[in-house]
Image: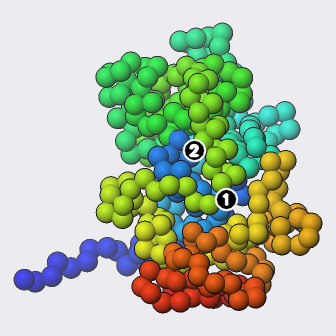
Amino acid sequence: MVAIPDKRDPALALADEALVARQEPRFRAYLGMSQIAAECSRQLWYNFRWVMRPAFDAATLKRFDDGHRSEAVLIARLKAVDCLEVHDTDENGDQFGFRDFGGHFRGHMDFVVLGLPQAPKSWHVGEAKASEKWTDLDKARAAVGEKNALAKWNPVYYGQAVLYMDYAGLDRHWLVCTSAGARKETAVRTNADPAHALVLKQKAERIIFAARPLDKIGSVDSFACRWCDFADICHRNKAPERNCRTCIHATPERTGGWTCGLPSEPIAITLKQQEAGCPQHRFIPELVGGDQTDVRGSTIIYRRPDGSEWADDGKAVPA
């Protein structure tokens, strides 16, 4: 059989390669409210503990860029409506933000709006999303009604909505979902759900202050795990990164910041120090993918699943 030629324009392929090469993968300093409703707490813990530096392909980076641009276009259009009062920054010109658990749990709200014709006297938390599945939001509304549509369409966005309402002290949320480029859009309103917000706060607290990875939700072949970025680390014993957050000596403090417990008195460690790590780094045992069998001085000895021995001396990572 003759192979089908690759029709991808070579210049566009090079543009994608350049886009990927230009990204600066950086760890997020906190657990995000925008993701806390995701199904797997272990995955969220991996993110918070910097187990693997995030890196995205060209398609994902394009979606991020499209989302940011679409949000800006949408807010500008809303500000041009006479009956609407729209604010996308606070009195200091900063994006609206919320913090909890010493700043380890954070979220940033797109805007607030007053004057929606459906409820002109109520302030609403405003959220802008760009999604290829924007029409599915209309289908959800038709199936369960407007106030329940967001929860049915996207539980993660719903979790974000109820948390932002809770932290903002508002009881209404208005999500506008646009197609790529903000050419078409739809919107739904959602009521506050303090009980669900509390559940998500409790979940965040468990993740942030857990010293060990939380339980897995499936096997390597399960649908929930198959496409996870952390599947190799979680199920195949791939080595994590060395930094303070994967070290057994580091602790997120309830008052904020992180400390290293290696000295006689715990000392604060900055984000820059956390990312760099130090020679005294020793992995959280569950990240090694083996059983601890011995300690030789400051070196911890593990027996790997294949029967090999590996020594955690603060330098190498398990193969």
- Quadrant of the image occupied by residue 245: bottom right
**Which residue extends farthest right?**
265
Q: Position of residue 3 (x, y in %)?
A: 15, 82
Instruction: Let me know if residue 65 appears in the view.
Output: no
- State the residue position of label 2: 36
Q: Residue at x 81, y 40 (%)?
A: 93
Q: Nearer the viewer, residue 212 or 49?
A: 212
Residue at left 83%, top 51%? 256
Q: Nearer the viewer, residue 246 or 299?
A: 299
Q: CA distance from mark 2 to mark 1?
A: 18 Å
Residue pointed to by mark 1: 211
Characterize the local packing of mark 1: few (<14), some (14-19) or many (20 or more) Cα atoms within 10 angstroms. Answer: some
Asked where in the image residue 258 lies, by quadrant, the reply is bottom right
x%, y% of residue 103? 78, 47
Instruction: Name the residue: 45% across, 30% down.
Output: 151
In the depicted view, which residue is nearer to us: 154 or 72? Answer: 154
Q: Is residue 107 visible?
A: yes
Circle 2: is it few (<14), some (14-19), or many (20+) Cα within 10 Å?
A: many
- Please, is residue 106 above or below residue 302 in the view? above
Kindly state the secondary structure of the residue where label 2 is placed.
loop
* 70 relative position to 132: left or right: right
Do the numbered discs 2 and 1 sit on residues whose CB atoms are within 8 Å? no
- Residue 31 location (% of width, % of height): 66, 51
Left or right: 181 as drawn, with respect to 35: left
The amino acid marked with disc number 2 is Ile
Q: Position of residue 43 (x, y in %)?
A: 52, 57
Position of residue 118 relative to residue 174, above or below, is: above
Eyeballing the image, is 284 above or below 295?
Answer: above
Q: Secondary structure at mark 1?
A: loop
Q: How is the image coloured?
A: rainbow
Of the numbered discs 2 and 1, the one sitting upstream in the chain is 2
